Amino acid sequence: MKRVRLIAAMVLGMSAAACSSVDTASRNAPYETVPAQAVAPAPSFQLAGMNVVVPTTLKVSERNSYYPGGDIVWRGDAYGNRYEQVKSIFEDAVVLGGTQVQGEIPVNVNIELKRFHALTEKTRYSVGGVHAIEFVMIITDPVTGAVLRGPKEIKASLVGYGGEKALQAEARGLTQKYRITQHLARVVMDEMTKPQGFVAPKGGVTAQVVPLGPVKPL
């Protein structure tokens, strides 16, 4: 019985010593051995070119209801080829946002649309809503085609004005097309300048658009 108690006491003593040595080693470890969280540097890009793809497999809806089905809903231009109209909006946005950036590395901005669901006439002139815009963006080397950033799935939704607010906005030139173009330009600029790229605000929908200026030629 005495032998059992002696062994138990020895085991407890060894355990306490082990805990003490580990704790001491941790406290006395040099600062350099503590892993630090890496912080991604801000990119230093400049726009060299672009490629915007609006797949014709996306479904266009011309239905004038509060929430029509379809991948592309657009009323900010006269009735016509919605694929080309939406592509033009993105191209203007890339030029506007990209030419604000004066980095060192020439890049191409590549965008493939997934969803462009703006407001119908019925929604715009009543309750308003959200311009739901989703796309994939990749930044590449213009010579080698090597991927420098992405692919990144981006949800860049924007508050769509309705009723009297929409009418007042249009009177000041703040049309759906203008606001969406300026918003997407900001998204492109964020992707080209910020370590984390574009980050949607809390709730996922941007409310206010701060204009970057008129569209500049590439």
Image (cartoon, grey):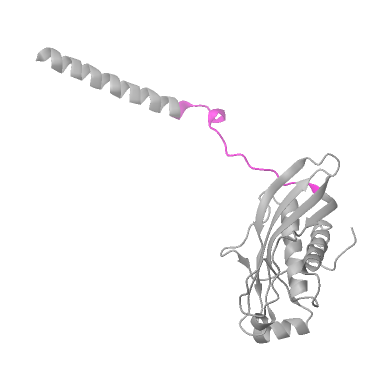
x, y percentage for residue 171?
Answer: 77, 85
Is residue 136 in view? yes
Q: Nearer the viewer, residue 55 or 204?
A: 55
Furthest toward the top, the residue is: 3
- Number of residue marks: 0
Q: Position of residue 152 (x, y in %)?
A: 67, 50
Could you say which is closer to the camera, residue 204 or residue 137? 137
- Quarter of the image for residue 40 reads top right
Q: Residue furthest left?
A: 1
The image quadrant where one finds the N terminus is top left
Taking depth in this image into account, of 168 and 176 the one nearest to the observer is 176
The secondary structure that most of the magenta stretch takes on is loop
Q: Quadrant of the C terminus?
A: bottom right
Magenta residues? 27-45
- Across and down, in percent, residue 74 comes to 73, 73
For residue 41, what is the image quadrant? top right
Q: Residue at x 73, y 69 (%)?
A: 180
7 vs 24, left or right, is left
When the figure is inspected, residue 112 is found, relative to residue 75, above or below; the finding is above
Magenta stretch contains residue 28: yes
Q: Position of residue 181 (x, y in %)?
A: 77, 67
Residue plotted at (82% across, 47% down)? 107
The structure residue drawn at horizontal position 75% and vertical position 52%, both measured from the top left corner, is 192
Task: Give above or below for 114 relative to 29.
Answer: below
Residue 181 colored magenta?
no
